[in-house]
Amino acid sequence: MVDNKSFSKQFQLFAKFGDRDSDGRTIKLSQSDKWMRQAKVIDGKKITSTDTAICFKKLKLPKLTESEYTTFLEDLGRTKGIDVGEIKSMMVSCGNPGFTSAVNNSKTPGAVERLTDPSKYTGSHKERFDESGKGKGLAGRRDDVDTSGYVAGYTNKDTYDKERGTST
């Protein structure tokens, strides 16, 4: 069973989260969805933000007090076949607003991951990194002139003497 005191405390914290003008007594749908995402109540499969919007709009109010919010949760639980106590316990145990364990994992999204993968760089950009993906620093940005007599793409440099068995 969920402690009503701790649920009230969480309700006030999330009611103020992202809204400078809020006094913590009423909560908007957007704040409720942030709370439910952080608590992993909204998982995109069983419960979605569309489901919460439908149940929220049934009450025909832009902001809900704590008692009205409990009515909203009961309707959501009844509609989706989930125990309200389970939903409330998830919402109480999720922590303070904005602080989730996902923040500490710093996992980059797919697009950023592709953009920061040096193995996918082409042209002059690929010359700035070594095989492990570590930057070469100034040597990677500066185009030093090779005065050895070989062209840039030649791969058999310094192999003539080894093949002939002679040394210079």
Image (cartoon, rainbow, N blue to C red):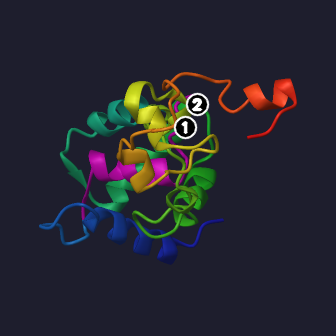
What residue is at 25 percent from the left and 68 percent from the top?
25
Residue 34 on the magenta segment: yes
Q: Quadrant of the C terminus?
A: top right
Q: Quadrant of the N terminus?
A: bottom right
Residue in view at x 37 percent, y 35 percent? 55
Q: Foreground residue, 150 or 89?
A: 150
Q: Position of residue 163 (x, y in %)?
A: 84, 24
Q: CA distance from mark 2 to mark 1?
A: 7 Å
Residue 63, position as x, y percentages in the image: 21, 52
Examine the rendered structure and indicate whether residue 161 appears above or below residue 168.
Answer: above
Q: Residues within 10 Å of mark 1 (few under 14, many from 20)?
A: few
The correct choice, above or below, for 100 with respect to 148 in the image is: below
Q: Is residue 152 above or below residue 67?
A: above
Q: Can you identify the residue that label 1 sits on? A: 43
- Amino acid carrying mark 2 in the image: Lys
**The residue under label 1 is which amino acid type?**
Asp
Q: Please state if 26 lies on the left or on the right of 123 as rendered.
A: left
Q: Residues within 10 Å of mark 2 (few under 14, many from 20)?
A: few
Give the structural element (helix, strand or loop) at label 2. Answer: loop
Q: Which residues are magenta?
A: 26-45
Dot label at residue 118: none
Quadrant of res 167? top right
Give the label on residue 46, or none.
2
Along the viewing direction, whichever of 24 and 43 lies nearer the viewer: 43
- Is residue 115 visible in the rendered image? The answer is yes
Q: Marks 1 and 2: in contact by CB < 8 Å?
A: yes
Extreme-left residue of the structure: 21
Q: Residue at x 35, y 64 (%)?
A: 14
